[in-house]
Amino acid sequence: MYYPSALVTVKPSIDNSSFYLQLDDNTTLAPTNMKVSPFGKKEVRALVNYTLDDQAETSPHSRAVRINWIDSILTKPLAANLGNMNEKTYGDDPVEIINDWVTIAEDGYLTLRFRTRWGYGVKHTINLVPSAEKEQPYKVRLYHNAKSDLAGRIGDALVAFRIKSTATQTENSSDTENIVDLILEWKSYSGIKTATFKYRVPKEPITGITEGSFVKMLD
């Protein structure tokens, strides 16, 4: 029970009278021991440890589960593309993106585990900015501002970004047709790097965003 079972999206109802967990693009989990989301009306990404509850009714969800613990991840919207002002506004300090099971594009989110230097209790900022190039609508750039906190110990953090897209699935389109290459660009300690994620475009437009609490010294 010490380690997370999964990375999920916590999806409460409008009034938070109920909620469920989106495990991946196709699988949902129905908590049987928690009626309302511990994060209120906020939709956030979270790490969760759960146990399958085979005795409970699952409909309309894929599985029934008992939540042992759940902790939210900092969840943010895309930041505005400010052109030549991006680096000045959002910072240009290096990070490394870690190839890990939580580094994934799914359910309308890009979740990242990244590594940098931390120290002295300074709150860093991290932002994801969409490309201004019309021919690359699924390219994004990660910006990190360490607030001059560059000499601390190396440590990891998690952040999730909700990806807005002008394109959404149509009712008649197949899942295969709506899987695109999402290109992430960032400044690493050895220069500019890129990574490509397979991303399934959501069927519905994405709206609203809230922040989580998993990373305490990150904004």
Image (cartoon, rainbow, N blue to C red):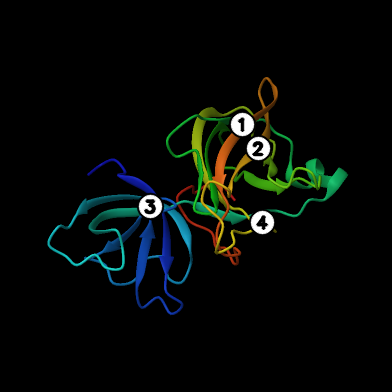
Question: Amino acid under label 3?
Answer: Leu
Image position, residue 37 (x, y; %): 36, 67
Q: Is residue 79 left or right of residue 208?
A: right
Q: Could you say whether the residue bearing mark 2 is in a helix, strand or loop?
A: strand
* Crowding near the residue tagged with mark 2, few <14, some 14–19, many ≥20 C-alpha atoms within 10 Å: some
Q: Could you say whether the residue bearing mark 1 is in a helix, strand or loop?
A: strand
Please, is residue 192 above or below residue 209 in the view? Answer: above
Residue 72: quarter of image = bottom left
Q: Is residue 191 left or right of residue 210?
A: right
Please, is residue 213 above or below residue 209 in the view? Answer: above
Residue furthest right in the image: 84
| Residue closest to the eye, 70 or 164 | 164
Q: Which residue is mark 1?
A: 195
Q: Which residue is mark 2?
A: 183
Which numbered disc covers residue 165? Answer: 4
Q: Are marks 2 and 1 in contact (CB under 8 Å)?
A: yes
Q: Could you say whether the residue bearing mark 4 is in a helix, strand or loop?
A: loop
Q: Are marks 3 and 4 in contact (CB under 8 Å)?
A: no
